[in-house]
Amino acid sequence: MITDPPTTITVPNSVLSRLKMYKAGGKTYAEVLEELMDAVPPERFLDWVRKELERPAVPYLEARSRLGLRKD
């Protein structure tokens, strides 16, 4: 009996490609993700999220300009 049933998550192909680089030695994706999550404690991640949420919003046209995109 499975006590922790698997689920499906959707990630962009670019993320999957990066994730595959970490998958070596017969590891499962679950093991790879566990190792990555263990490397960044939740508190550190949540601190980063809080700081990001406190940053002021950037107007759309300014953001496009910063990214070197056309303003239209």
Image (spheres, rainbow, N blue to C red):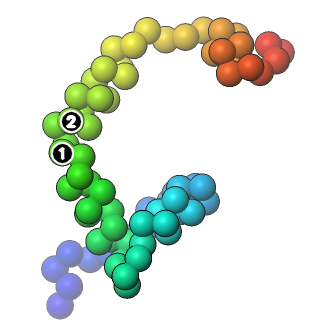
Kind of residue indicated by mark 2: Arg
Q: Amino acid at mark 1?
A: Pro
Q: Find numbered disc 1 in the image and state the secondary structure of the residue it sits on.
A: loop
Q: Are marks 1 and 2 in contact (CB under 8 Å)?
A: yes
Residue 62 x %, y %: 65, 9
How far is disc 1 from disc 2 in space, using C-alphas? 5 Å
In the visual, does 24 lie left or right of 41?
A: right
Residue 20, image x, y percentages: 50, 68
Q: Residue at x 26, y 62 (%)?
A: 35
Nearer-the-camera pick, 23 or 28 = 23
Report which quarter residue 51 is drawn in: top left
Label 2 Cα neighbours within 10 Å, binned few <14 / some 14-19 / many ≥20 = few
Picture quadrant where residue 2 is located:
bottom left
Residue 60 appearing in the image: no
Q: Which residue is mark 2?
A: 44
Q: Which residue is mark 1?
A: 41
